[in-house]
């Protein structure tokens, strides 16, 4: 099933791996990071900006795209690639995560989940089949199965029932995916399963075995970064390293600080998305390297550019590097200027820090790939 | 006084002129348009974006920069060019227009004007001398004298008194400008006078003679676009064509729609600024050419990209043109996509239409220069 993935190197000292993921819109060296384009745009950035950042793949959200612009518009444009003018790869979530976040506004049954739109309260139903159908209209290069991302405080019984249902939904998703492939806006798309089970290692391993036996192009680890201690999250990821197929890509779904990404890479994860670099940017939080050796502790820092201490600072927002267009562009602007932009509510400030933070996360993964090659990780 | 300006061509059929304005940060073909960077940024754009738009000069607002980031920050950076990383020309207004707009929060005396900050209510005084001092810290390439922009409904007596005071302030500004030149952040800056007098042609001509006799590097026409009929505005500009020195640049201060700019150019105006392309962009109003011959009526149109009718539109935001980087970049994005961005509150929408509209105004002036050469205007 994993013809899409070629593993080229595994670390001697950890479970870190190097490989290449083949998608219908390009081959992507792993491990990699996907900036989040929730509603068809990485907030404040155009597709050409994201190209300049050298991101080979972005993540977009099925729930949001389904509501707006809606399926009919995406059909007319022939998919999200054409709609947003992005010729590289796109991964979409199933829509489940946002729907489940609606709380009282949604209801789960075996069939799927019914929910009220957060925009106008209109009623909708999301089933495994419908999630796949939407993703095939979007034309995602990597579609995700519909799962339930269980809360960190789920009772054991609920957790087991939920995971069993997620497995049944995974089977339905795969069936629908193959059925709709020919008519889809991306006939060469990949489908990933999603492992759940909270922090219950036994349940996680059982579910991993079930998913492997169904067979997917890749496997996501869902249901973490939902409030559990980081140690539990690491323990689960480590346990799954031995349980998920070695020859398929593994995708950690959910927020991860830079140092957490390093720990997950050491435990065999190949793919990440994270809203932190973009969301935090809009509040003036800037990620930057304290040193480039990402195997060292404290390799990064995050600073609040809005702080008074940067009022007179001529320090560049980003250090300029050779052959790195974005760093050269961003090095023109001082922390003092960017602070001013935030102070006077100029949205350019949010944009410049977004560029800097996405650049940081992409560079982090680049450094990690080098560190795996050189045996530092 | 007007060593800064070289007139190269005057139309046979109108008062339209071609020339070059020399500033400390580059020579600029006239007539030209200045995008507005109120608080040290053209809203949503970075200095490198404005470079890519090929704008040779921007306008920034003394009042806003004085309050934030403030004089001490601008001193530390050596002026606004360094602060915002912009190596081309900058014109600043005197700060008077914003202060006078504060209404009850300001008081005019012979000495100057006292006002309360719109941000925190703190008390400040703006005198002709202080306006020049601030502009010399900013390091403007073109500084403006402090004037009173009289309301359209000013009583004749008030108007005459105000213009007389504006003349006295102009003398004080020139004196302070020469005194501070050596210590300024731009020793080769230019100083422009500002003609006032409402729609009273006699008063306008008298004031023009007074300003000419004081002697400035250029002359602005202020106090128009403040609510008077467009015909009155045209009449005043036409009358001033014969009264302002021919060999100095003339600058129309204030808002002007594209077709109004054409009329002012025909009446001998060389320089424009206007908030419409940027402000309207943020509400989804897109300017574009209906045809490229700007001497024809209805050469442009403005459309609301947020309208339902563009929901499925694959029409590009801007038509791609050879050797025009910005049009090529913007032609990637459809009206349907840009409409979607506005619908879901993605600020990228505002940014893309801002780029398109500033590009339109700059292109309009480019077409006007060609039309003057070819005798079409």
Image (cartoon, coloured by chain):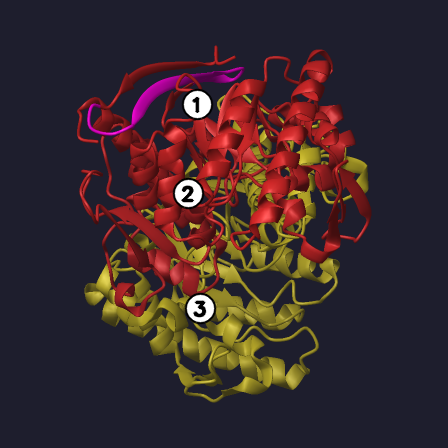
Chain colours: A yellow, B red
Subunit bearing disc 1: B
Left or right relative to B30: residue B63: right
Query: Of discs 2 and 3, which sits in the foreground?
Result: 3
Residue shown at 31% from the left, 21% from the top? B18
Q: Is residue B154 above or below residue A297?
A: below
Determine crowd level at label 1: few under 14, some 14-19, many 20+ residues with C-alpha closer than 10 A: many
SS assignment at label 2:
loop
**How far is the residue under mark 2 from the one under mark 3?**
22 Å
Query: Of discs 2 and 1, which sits in the foreground?
Result: 1
**How far is the residue under mark 2 from the one under mark 1?**
50 Å
Determine crowd level at label 3: few under 14, some 14-19, many 20+ residues with C-alpha closer than 10 A: many
Could you tell me how many numbered marks the image carries?
3
Subunit bearing disc 2: A
Q: Which residue is mark 3?
A: A64
Whether residue B39 is visible to the viewer of this picture, yes or no, is no
Question: Same chain for the residues at labels 2 and 3, yes or no?
Answer: yes
Residue A131 sits in quarter = bottom left
Q: Percent position (x, y) of residue B105?
A: 74, 54
């Amino acid at each position: 099933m994993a013809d899409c993935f070629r593993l080229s190197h595994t670390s001697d000292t950890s479970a870190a791996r190097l490989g290449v993921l083949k998608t219908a819109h390009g081959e992507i060296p792993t491990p990699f990071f996907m900036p989040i384009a929730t509603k068809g745009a990485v907030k404040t950035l155009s597709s050409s900006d994201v190209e300049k950042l050298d991101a080979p793949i972005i993540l977009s959200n099925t729930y949001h795209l389904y509501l707006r612009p809606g399926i009919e518009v995406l059909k007319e444009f022939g998919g999200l690639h054409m709609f947003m003018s992005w010729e590289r790869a796109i991964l979409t979530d199933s829509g489940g995560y946002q729907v489940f976040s609606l709380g009282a506004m949604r209801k789960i049954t075996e069939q799927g989940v019914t929910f009220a739109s957060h925009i106008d309260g209109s009623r909708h139903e999301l089933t495994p089949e419908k999630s796949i159908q939407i993703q095939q209209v979007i034309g995602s290069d990597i579609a995700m199965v519909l799962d339930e991302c269980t809360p960190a405080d789920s009772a054991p019984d609920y957790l087991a029932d939920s995971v069993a249902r997620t497995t049944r939904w995974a089977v339905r998703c795969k069936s629908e995916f193959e059925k709709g492939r020919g008519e889809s806006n991306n006939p060469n798309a990949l489908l990933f399963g999603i492992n759940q089970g909270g922090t219950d290692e036994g349940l996680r391993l059982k579910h991993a075995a079930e998913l492997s036996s169904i067979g997917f192009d890749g496997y996501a680890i869902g249901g973490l970064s939902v409030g559990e201690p980081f140690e539990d999250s690491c323990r689960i990821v480590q346990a799954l390293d031995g349980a998920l197929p070695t020859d398929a890509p593994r995708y950690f779904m959910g927020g991860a600080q830079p140092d957490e990404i390093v720990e997950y890479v050491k435990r065999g994860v190949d793919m990440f998305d994270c809203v932190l670099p973009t969301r935090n940017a809009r509040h003036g939080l800037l990620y930057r390297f304290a040193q480039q050796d990402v195997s060292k502790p404290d390799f990064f820092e995050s600073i609040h550019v809005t702080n008074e201490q940067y009022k007179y600072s001529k320090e560049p927002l980003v250090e300029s590097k050779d052959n790195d267009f974005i760093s050269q562009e961003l090095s023109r602007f001082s922390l003092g200027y960017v602070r001013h932009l935030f102070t006077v509510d100029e949205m350019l400030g949010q944009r410049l820090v977004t560029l800097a933070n996405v650049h940081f996360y992409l560079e982090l993964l680049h450094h990690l790939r080098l560190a795996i090659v050189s045996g530092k990780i």
